[in-house]
Image (cartoon, rainbow, N blue to C red):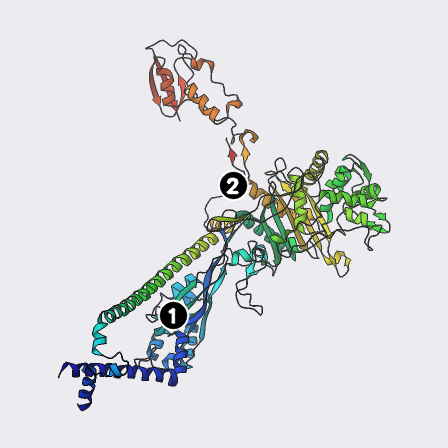
């Protein structure tokens, strides 16, 4: 308690440590810069908040990118699959296997105009 | 407690807190520094390469020939079972493995479905063994496709979160070819280094268009780093990757498919070593299909090497057309020039050309120059050439030079590794007295197949030698970066008169010459056969095998496509080797199928018969409308003349053959009362056509289907 008493006296006395040795730890200093300290706290709070938001956005962005890639890759895979299955030789063989009475044209089309 | 004391207490606590932070920071930096630095390195990976997407390669109809997709090697990690997670849990308990990976377990069944190379029981044994050994990197599926991976992730056991099932994957870019890796012009399209080799060429083009246009297809990778956000590793991009441009080729999938099928079938039938063929659009020089097949067994052929552009071969008799053209164009002969080969069926003999015995397989006796080409006589062509140029062979070589077919066309831009023809010169030490004769019928000059095709293409298109090309456009995001226009290398390879004579001879080859077996009733083919002994072990020999070929174009009257087929046959042969019956059927099959699919006839070309009526049957109807319709269809030249009586209102028209509606219109507009019976078209009218139309009188019509 004695230490606390001495310390509080030092902070509050007219003849404070601050006057003898430069220090930020004075009551006057804190009261005088309360607004700035408040701004710093708000800025820190904003920084943390914005950083959190930014990370959340990045996370969301990454998810969207993954979804987009998934759609893109699925499209390419399906497109390729259909392209491969549309190969004329495959169609011809399937027509033969299915016993469909469909024959390839042996005469070219006739252009009327 | 006074304000001062309270203030001191708060300040003291803050200082204590600061001291704690400072102590902890010191402890973290000094004592646990290495550990945390390693962790940071693990969580935030600097200088990550963000992969770009390699450009696509398309056909002439914008069908995908090569694209980029990820593929995966799939592993299972069982080590986590020996190390409890942060909650002290064992991630994959043994009973889970037993449940899913018994021989009839859902996991085993799923694997058997996705990767049928093993049965469910075999998968079960593999997984159980891996689990028992606590294998940390058990490879279960190699090169799984994207759709396969997605399917796997939806199956029992594998649909759990990754750290719950021990599933890990190794992802890499895969060059995806919808038509397969060994067919559909695979060597011309090329491939991509899938894995890192000693030169670090992963993702770079490896042959074909993939290599030729690698700088445009490849794109540029992005840069960034990976950061753990919400317990997930996320790529933070500093520079975006630039995807590659797309290459659009002139290849036509339908033609390529037909060519592959026809050539592959013939190679197997002949038990040949391989064969190559290409099709060119006559007017532009675009390569529409290119096939280089090698037989790998009794029933399989694969694309192995781009022989058509990277191989030189002795063209054999297909070169006789060149000699014939030079002789005609330099007025050394006419098509009617007579040449006596001295070789007849009754008295077979060869021709001694400075010690070289030149033979004909089919004796032709005394023939015209035109017939010498049609019957492909070595003796006749060599005799004509030697008679004309023996004293000045350079003039003959200059004639070939004038055509331009042996000049380097610098095809490397589309075909990496493309060879230029190797042409003989009289200044060479190896030039001999027999060289002129041998060159005239297709030996000594060695040439890539594509150059020979280009020569026949020039004959087909009226004498213009084109520069063959296979890439027509490179674009990125719809913006054209590079576009190729048809390029004429030589406007006139010969005079029109010479060209006409050459074309006549080439048609004769198919009509009644060495390729008469491929004379088609559907499509008119013109071309030349070729049979050349293979040069191997320092000499030409029957036992080395033969290149049998056919080069030509179709349809003869209005050529649309030129084509060459070369087959590398080895003895024993079913008969004497010959381009007509060996390579010709490939040409014919392709020509007939493509003629029906890609060519068209004008109405005026159609011979009227029961199936094809030249003039659509006009059942009269309103004259003005009919005339308007026929003029729009440009059928007015086909002598449609409506009956003169049809326009006269006072005369009863002939309505036989008309439908009910038209007949009713024609008669009622003349004030007649119409009674109809039956259905279909008018087969009888009660009042004769041409008699006066009296208003209010009745007319009976009989209709019948």
The answer to whether residue B106 of the structure is visible from this angle is: no
Quadrant containing the N terminus of chain B is bottom left
The reply, left or right, for residue B390 in relation to residue A22 is: right
Residue A81 in picture, x, y percent from top left: 45, 55
Q: Mark 1 or mark 2: which is in front?
A: 1
Q: Chain of mark 1?
A: B
| Rendering coords of residue B626 (x, y %) | 44, 22
Say which quarter of the image contains residue B115: bottom left
Q: Position of residue A101 (x, y in %)?
A: 46, 44
- B260 and B222: which one is in front? B222
Labels 1 and 2 share a subunit: no
Chain of the residue that carries numbered disc 2 in the rendered image? A
Seen as rendered, the residue at the extreme left is B1
Question: Which residue is tagged 2?
Answer: A105
| Of residues B417 and B138, the one drawn nearer to the viewer in this rendering | B417
Image quarter hosting the C terminus of chain B: top left
């Amino acid at each position: 308690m004695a230490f606390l008493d001495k310390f509080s006296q030092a902070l509050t006395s007219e003849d404070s440590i601050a006057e003898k040795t430069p220090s930020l730890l004075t009551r006057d200093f804190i009261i005088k810069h309360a607004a700035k300290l408040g701004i710093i706290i708000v800025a820190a709070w904003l920084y943390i908040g914005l950083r959190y938001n930014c990370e959340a956005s990045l996370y969301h962005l990454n998810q969207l990118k993954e979804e987009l890639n998934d759609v893109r890759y699925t499209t390419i895979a399906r497109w390729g699959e259909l392209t491969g299955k549309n190969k004329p030789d495959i169609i011809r063989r399937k027509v033969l296997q299915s016993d469909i009475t469909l024959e390839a044209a042996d005469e070219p089309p006739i252009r009327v105009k | 407690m006074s304000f001062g004391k309270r203030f001191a207490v708060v300040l003291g606590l803050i200082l204590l807190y600061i001291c704690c932070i400072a102590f902890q920071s010191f402890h973290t930096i000094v004592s646990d520094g290495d550990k945390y630095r390693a962790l940071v390195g693990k969580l935030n990976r600097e200088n990550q390469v963000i992969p770009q997407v390699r450009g696509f390669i398309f056909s002439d109809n914008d069908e995908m020939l090569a694209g980029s997709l990820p593929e995966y090697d799939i592993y299972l990690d069982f080590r986590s079972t020996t190390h409890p997670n942060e909650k002290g849990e064992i991630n994959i308990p043994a009973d889970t493995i037993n449940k899913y990976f018994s021989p009839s377990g859902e996991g085993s069944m799923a694997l058997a479905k996705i990767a049928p190379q093993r049965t469910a029981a075999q998968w079960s044994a593999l997984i159980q063994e891996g689990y028992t050994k606590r294998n940390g990197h058990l490879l279960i599926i190699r090169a799984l496709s994207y759709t396969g991976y997605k399917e796997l992730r939806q199956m029992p056991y594998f649909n759990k979160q990754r750290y719950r099932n021990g599933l890990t994957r190794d992802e890499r870019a895969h060059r995806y070819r919808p038509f397969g890796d060994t067919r559909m012009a695979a060597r011309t399209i090329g491939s991509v280094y899938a894995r890192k080799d000693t030169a670090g060429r992963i993702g770079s083009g490896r042959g074909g268009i993939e290599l030729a246009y690698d700088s445009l297809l490849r794109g540029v990778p992005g840069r960034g780093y990976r950061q753990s956000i919400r317990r997930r590793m996320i790529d933070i991009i500093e520079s975006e990757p630039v995807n590659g441009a797309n290459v659009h080729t002139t290849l036509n999938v339908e033609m390529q498919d037909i060519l592959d099928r026809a050539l592959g079938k013939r190679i197997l039938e002949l038990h040949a070593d391989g064969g190559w063929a290409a099709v060119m659009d006559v007017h532009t020089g675009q390569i529409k299909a290119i096939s280089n097949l090698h037989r790998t067994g009794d029933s399989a052929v694969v694309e192995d090497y781009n022989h058509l552009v990277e191989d030189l071969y002795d063209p054999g008799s297909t070169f006789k057309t060149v000699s014939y053209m030079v002789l005609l164009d330099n007025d050394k002969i006419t098509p009617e020039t007579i040449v006596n080969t001295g070789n007849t069926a009754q008295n077979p003999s060869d021709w001694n050309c400075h010690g070289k015995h030149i033979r004909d397989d089919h004796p032709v006796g005394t023939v015209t120059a035109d017939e010498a080409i049609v019957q492909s006589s070595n003796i006749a062509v060599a005799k004509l050439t030697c008679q004309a140029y023996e004293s000045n062979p350079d003039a003959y070589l200059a004639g070939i030079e004038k055509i331009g077919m042996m000049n380097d066309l610098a095809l490397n831009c589309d075909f990496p590794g493309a060879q230029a023809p190797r042409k003989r010169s009289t200044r060479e030490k190896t030039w001999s007295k027999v060289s002129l004769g041998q060159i005239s019928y297709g030996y000594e000059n060695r040439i890539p197949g594509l150059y020979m095709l280009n020569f026949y293409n020039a004959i087909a298109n009226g004498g213009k030698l084109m520069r063959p090309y296979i890439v027509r456009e490179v674009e990125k995001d719809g913006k054209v970066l590079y576009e190729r226009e048809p390029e004429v290398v030589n406007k006139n390879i010969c005079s029109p008169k010479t060209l006409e004579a050459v074309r006549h001879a080439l048609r004769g080859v198919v009509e009644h010459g060495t390729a008469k077996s491929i004379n088609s009733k559907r499509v008119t083919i013109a071309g030349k056969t070729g049979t050349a002994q293979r040069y191997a072990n320092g000499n030409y020999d029957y036992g080395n095998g033969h290149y049998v070929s056919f080069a030509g174009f179709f349809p003869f009257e209005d050529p649309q496509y030129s084509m060459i087929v070369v087959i590398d046959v080895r003895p024993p042969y079913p008969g004497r080797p010959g381009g007509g019956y060996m390579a010709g059927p490939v040409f014919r099959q392709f020509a007939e199928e493509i003629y029906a699919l890609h060519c068209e006839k004008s109405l005026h070309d159609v011979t009227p018969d029961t199936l094809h009526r030249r003039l659509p049957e006009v059942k009269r109807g309103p004259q003005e409308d009919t005339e308007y319709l026929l003029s729009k269809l440009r059928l007015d030249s086909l002598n449609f003349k409506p009956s003169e009586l049809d326009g006269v209102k006072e005369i009863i028209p002939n309505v036989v053959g008309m439908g009910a509606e038209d007949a009713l219109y024609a008669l009622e507009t003349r004030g007649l009362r119409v009674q109809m019976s039956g259905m279909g078209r008018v087969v009888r009218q009660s009042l004769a056509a041409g008699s006066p139309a009296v208003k209010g009188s009745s007319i009976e019509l009989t209709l019948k289907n």
